[in-house]
Amino acid sequence: MPTPRRTWAEHSSQSNPKEAQVTHSDIELDVDFDTHVLNGHVEHTVAVKADGVQQLQLDTREVSVGGVTVNGQPAESSLGEPHPALGSRLTVQLPAGLKAGDTVKVGIEFAASPQASAVQWLPPEQTAGKRHPYLFTQCQAIHARSILPCQDSPGSKFTYTAAVRVPNELRALMSAVPEDAGAAGGDGELPRAKQKQRPGSKVYRFKQAVPIPSYLLALAVGNLESRPLGPISAVWSEPEMVEAGAHEFAETAKFLETAEEIAGPYVWGRYDLLLLPPSFPYGGMENPCLTFVTPTLLAGDRSLANVVAHEIAHSWTGNLVTNSSWESFWLNEGFTVFLERKILGRLYGEQRYQFQAAQGWLKLQDTVRKQFGEDHPFTCLVPDLSGGVDPDDAFSSIPYERGFAFIHYLQELVGGSAVFEPFFKAYIQRFKDTPLNSDDFKAFFCDYFKDNAAIQQVDWDTWYYAPGMPPVTNQYDESLGKQAYELAKKWHTSDVMGIGSNGPAEASADDLKDWSSTQIVAFLDKLAELRALQPLHPSVTRKMNELYQLDGRTNSEIRSSWLLLCINAGDEAVLPVVKDFLTTQGRMKFLRPLYRALYNSKSAAAKQLALDTYQEHKQSYHPIASKMATARCSIAASASGSARRPAAQRPLAAVRPLRAGAACSRREAAVWRRQAEPEGAAPAQAADSSSSSAAAAAADETTFYEGSGAPAELALSLLLGVFVITLPLTIASVGRRLWIKYKFTNKRLIVTTNSPILKREVQVSYDQIKEIRSAPRAFGLWGDMVVFLKDGSRLELAGLERFQDIVDYIEAQRRKL
């Protein structure tokens, strides 16, 4: 049983808001495109929370700090030693004798580094117009500290005003309501900045009257125009893209109205959208008053506008009701996905809610099983971020989709939407002014439904703290996806063994006629799920493209799902399309899985494409995306190697997908070093071994069993092959007997595939094995075995004769280790 955590500490900040909290910030920023430096001044209004407080502690990361004042007088300050993820604590000495309820003003001159992790400076050639530079920030999760000293915790909220100086030809926007365009004369005066005036510039002013956490502080500067979307909404972008944005996001006002019906009044004054250049690393970012969105949403048919519904939902869940630390991030994203799907269900029917939920469940399965592994701590709904873990490393679809699954489960448990939606409104009202943690939510839920006996069934500890898939599988109405799933099964059964086919006999170009993009994605994702253990053959993906013209699709969601399916199939014909997609947008949702799939592909050309493309284009990615796209060890450690060991000759543990965001152990680093070495080089850890000792080790190896699929299984399969429904099983059995060889020695197990289409050898030493599960078939005449490895990958061996003897032998060898 998972052990619940009963105390809630803020592990991602070195500030002290419980003693002295910043409640308002007055900010001046000078945007210098020549030096790529944000110079500025901030005056924090600080509320003293306890008697005798002597210090204000703030978060910084590579920020230069100049003069510091308290109530207008010079004050002592010091900067602590830098932490790799958390940065350096800035400590400001406060006057003696302060009491709870007192207020002080702390002024700080600062300059953000040109390499600030929150800021991306774009040269003109990386913009749509190619004439003016561009800047935008991305402060989630803990990147605001790289711009200015602040209390960089989601549980510490503040209001702010800002004055931003930019070149005359550019426009500034912030996560606040604009006040005026500043000095028409153009000398750009900032009264408290180090350089008070700058010729050829002007100042834009902003006010955010609703308290926000620091991760929602946002700035963008560029050649920007706007088009109206509704009474309080507009879309901003470069002139070259603004009309496309106005068309794509025309339903914004409708989303807002529907969200208010479900969640209550909208309190932010404005809801504008900023359509950013392609390097923006997220689909959207819910900055208050000004949602940032990626141009990958420009599908032309508004089919991806649900991202806007998601960001609108954040106006209540996340921006207004905020998790107190990143460990409770699921409260932010799980409720936002829930409200997003509620909005879509109200507008387009309940089946849309159900279909989106079912698709989300597939995404959750994929993240748990492929990206992390069932036992990875980052698959917990409430991960442990103590010890200086960077919250970026834990970010994935887990808080979104596992969080939604939990909320939907609670909704159905207490009686459905009619009962749960009033609770949801009450939840918003209760916590709109008070950040909360997961236990706060549990207490409020249990109190609200205290008379509902069904809530006794909730296993809170397992939902919160157990890794892997949730303890309960929700049932969703998948009728909207029925056609997509049926077509996926047809293509799956047409190539069960992965040896190639011409596709289903009845397949035609009309299969996808009149399908929505959501249905096409559902078809591709379901097919990917079915092929998780045995990828399709490239001839099958080429046939699919011939019929459905998938290589040429411009919808980014379709494109991503299709390219992943092809990469996993070893379909090298699609590699130019993959490169184009990787180099024309910088959204992490697409970069991370595509780079991971390329690097772990059985195709040497795909692996090389990953390395070359990343090296050529890493400077055009946002710093956060660049960090995550490297998959930490895989790209970075291998970028220097020119020739690499083919995937077919590597042990299974070395070809598994790297767990994105996971810290690299010494063992994992050694694996990636081996992959980076030129062909024929000795492994790094064996560099001191002599060739004679290696020969002696080989001489000591003895074989316990060697053979192919069980003859009894083949005979039974041939008899059953007369039935259409069992024909795929017959084909699989024949393939195992003809082309797959199993070998078990006292040191390792070896699986060799030698078909006309695929030649591959997988070797696993017994010390790599975590667990073995086996199942007898036909009263024990043969059996199947699944080998689970310590790194999260697994190997399936089907149709083994003497399978129980083999299992016992492997376990005996493992006990000797």
Image: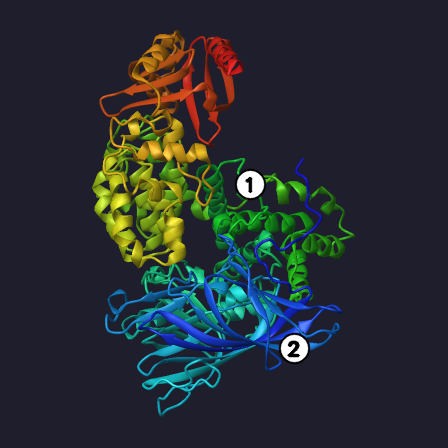
- Considering only vertical position in the picture, is 546 above or below 690? below
Q: Amino acid at mark 2?
A: Val
Whether residue 190 is visible, yes or no, is yes
Horizontal side of 189 relative to 158 (left or right) equals: left
Badge 1 marks a residue whose secondary structure is: helix
Horizontal side of 426 relative to 293 (left or right) equals: right
Give the image quarter of residue 758: top left
- Considering only vertical position in the picture, is 634 above or below 502? below
Residue 377's mark? 1
Badge 2 marks a residue whose secondary structure is: strand
Q: Residue at x 71, y 42 (%)?
A: 457
Residue 210's mark? none
Give the image quarter of residue 17: bottom right
Percent x, y for residue 251? 43, 69
Q: Residue at x 39, y 86 (%)?
A: 197
- Considering only vertical position in the picture, is 478 above or below 348? above
- Considering only vertical position in the picture, is 206 above or below 82? below
Percent x, y for residue 491? 33, 35
Q: Amino acid at mark 1?
A: Pro
C-alpha distance separating marks 2 and 1 = 41 Å
Alpha-carbon neighbours of circle 1 within 10 Å: few (<14), some, or many (≥20)?
some
Display colour scheme: rainbow
Alpha-carbon neighbours of circle 2 within 10 Å: few (<14), some, or many (≥20)?
some
Q: Residue furthest bottom?
A: 185
Q: Residue at x 29, y 49 (%)?
A: 614
Percent x, y for residue 148? 49, 69
Whether residue 518 is visible, yes or no, is no
- Looking at the image, tell me whether mark 2 or mark 1 is earlier in sequence order: 2
Residue 104's mark? 2
Percent x, y for residue 688? 35, 23
Closer to us: 708 or 39: 39
